[in-house]
């Protein structure tokens, strides 16, 4: 009888603990891309939800802003991980090989690295794609209207050799 009482007590405390949320994963934090890029340290180790442009191709998988952001711009590498069936269906709508996708992603935000080609200190490990708004193919001559270009901040340059040469031209032309 005493053993039965112990088992019942443990069961009750387990149910109460579950009902109070002990051991439960907290819901993801919704964050604007500009806030994430400006001060990524606020989100390290957290599950986040962010709406951004996913730019991918040969040796590149990164998030880009959906609007010009003031302030510092930290580059964010993206890794698409294990996803549920709905996310896989959405992911299969992305252009093959090289492309752009305006979407809302959920995943764990991490610091450390280097990630990707070595130039990224931050990474979003995506485990869920919540919504796909648009897709496109990148081209210097023809960017989709939902991508950001010509932001006035020098710190907003993209991670590429053409951007680096453009930055050098801007710096030398001001002298």
Image (cartoon, rainbow, N blue to C red):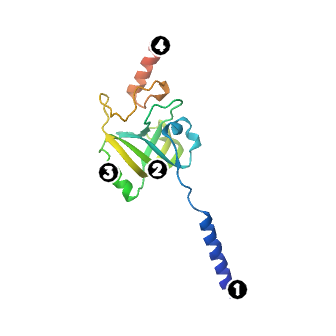
Q: Residues within 10 Å of mark 3 (few under 14, many from 20)?
A: few
Q: How many marks?
A: 4
Question: Any mark on residue 174, and which?
Answer: 4
* Quarter of the rendering containing residue 57: top left
Q: Residues within 10 Å of mark 4 (few under 14, many from 20)?
A: few
Real-space Cα distance between discs 1 and 2? 48 Å
Answer with mark 3 or mark 4, whichever residue precedes in sequence: 3
Q: Which residue is mark 3?
A: 92
Question: Any mark on residue 2, and which?
Answer: 1
Across and down, in percent, residue 59 comes to 38, 39
Real-space Cα distance between discs 3 and 4? 45 Å
Question: Any mark on residue 144, and which?
Answer: none
Q: Which residue is mark 2?
A: 106
Residue 98 in view in this figure: no
Q: From the viewer's perspective, is 39 left or right of 132?
A: right
Say which residue appears at 56% left-offset and 56% top-offset: 26
Tags 1 and 2 in contact by the CB under 8 Å rule?
no
Q: Residues within 10 Å of mark 1 (few under 14, many from 20)?
A: few
Answer with mark 1 or mark 2, whichever residue precedes in sequence: 1
> What secondary structure is found at the residue carrying circle 3?
loop
Answer with mark 3 or mark 1, whichever residue precedes in sequence: 1
Answer with mark 2 or mark 4, whichever residue precedes in sequence: 2
Answer with mark 3 or mark 2, whichever residue precedes in sequence: 3
Tags 2 and 4 in contact by the CB under 8 Å rule?
no
Real-space Cα distance between discs 4 and 1? 84 Å
């Amino acid at each position: 009888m005493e053993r039965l009482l112990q088992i019942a007590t443990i069961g009750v405390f387990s149910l109460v603990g579950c009902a109070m949320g002990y051991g439960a994963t907290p819901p993801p934090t919704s964050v604007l891309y500009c806030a994430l890029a400006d001060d990524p340290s606020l989100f390290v180790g957290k599950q986040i939800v962010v709406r951004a442009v996913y730019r991918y191709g040969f040796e590149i998988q990164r998030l880009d802003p959906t609007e010009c952001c003031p302030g510092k711009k930290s580059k964010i590498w993206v890794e698409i991980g294990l996803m549920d069936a709905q996310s896989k269906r959405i992911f299969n709508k992305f252009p093959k090989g090289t492309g752009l996708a305006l979407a809302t992603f959920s995943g764990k935000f991490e610091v450390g690295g280097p990630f990707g080609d070595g130039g990224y200190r931050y990474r979003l490990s995506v485990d869920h794609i919540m919504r796909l708004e648009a897709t496109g193919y990148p081209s210097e001559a023809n960017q989709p209207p939902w991508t950001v270009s010509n932001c006035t901040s020098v710190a907003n340059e993209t991670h590429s050799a053409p951007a680096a040469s453009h930055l050098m031209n801007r710096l030398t032309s001001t002298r």
